[in-house]
Amino acid sequence: MEYELTTPISEEDIRKLHTNDILYITGTVFTARDEAHERALEWFKEGKKLPIDPSGLAVFHCGPIVRKIDEGWEMVAAGPTTSTRMEMFESEFIEAFKPRVIIGKGGMGSKTTAAMEKIGAVYGAYIGGAAVLAAKAVKKIVDVSWLDLGMPEALWIMEVNRFGPLIIAIDSYGSNLYEEVKTKVEQNQKEIYKKLGF
């Protein structure tokens, strides 16, 4: 199935999605890599308000290339970062801030999958190597925060139009395509080794 959702996205809409579905997002997406996740959680514990309310939004694991133009910014390239870098933070991030879509590449682990099932969130896999295509979906950079962390680690707040296609690789029911593929590979490997006499 193919879906188009506009932020803020409700839990009800997220619960309609299943692994292998295709998703396009319109509205607000913000970038956050490991340093931004770590700071966001520190601020949460200290009772500080984040520069953006992540609830109902999409978080993009991305270290973008951005160009300054006049008083604003222009997105040049926005390729996904390998999401396993954020695994140590993501479950806590999801429970604290309730974003509905996590975007990245390479998948995430069991802790994140469990948090998505509990809160109602999904992981949308974006194609690696398509950074310029992703940038074309960015209609406007609304704001940037935490530039002291550097351009790739800052929070870039963007308005996007039909950002995608995202393949739902982890849904809100505990299904994780990456784990399923891993299990099948391991099963096939055993069968092949058995046939070869190992």
Image: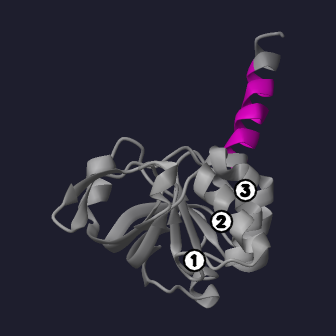
**Residue appearing at x 59%, y 57% in the figure:** 36
**Residue appearing at x 66%, y 51% in the figure:** 86
Residue tagged 3: 89
User: What secondary structure do most residues of the magenta stretch adopt?
Assistant: helix
Query: Quick check: is 186 in the magenta stretch?
Result: yes
Q: What residue type is labelled 2?
A: Ala
Q: Nearer the viewer, residue 17 or 192?
A: 17
Query: Quick check: is 28 in the magenta stretch?
Result: no
The segment highlighted magenta reads: 180-192
Q: Which of 96 and 123 is in front in this view?
A: 96
Q: Where is residue 173 in the image (x, y as percent from the top left)?
A: 73, 72
Q: What residue type is labelled 1?
A: Pro
Is disc 2 surrounded by few (<14), some (14 to 19) or many (20+) residues within 10 Å?
many
Residue tagged 1: 54
**Residue appearing at x 52%, y 50% in the figure:** 149
Residue tagged 2: 40
Q: Position of residue 111 (x, y in %)?
A: 80, 57
In the current view of this chain or complex, which residue is farthest to the front? 148
Looking at the rendered structure, the secondary structure element under dot 3 is helix
Between discs 2 and 3, the one toward the N terminus: 2
The image quarter containing residue 39 is bottom right
Between discs 1 and 2, the one toward the N terminus: 2
Q: Which image quadrant: the C terminus?
A: top right
The image quarter containing residue 72 is bottom left
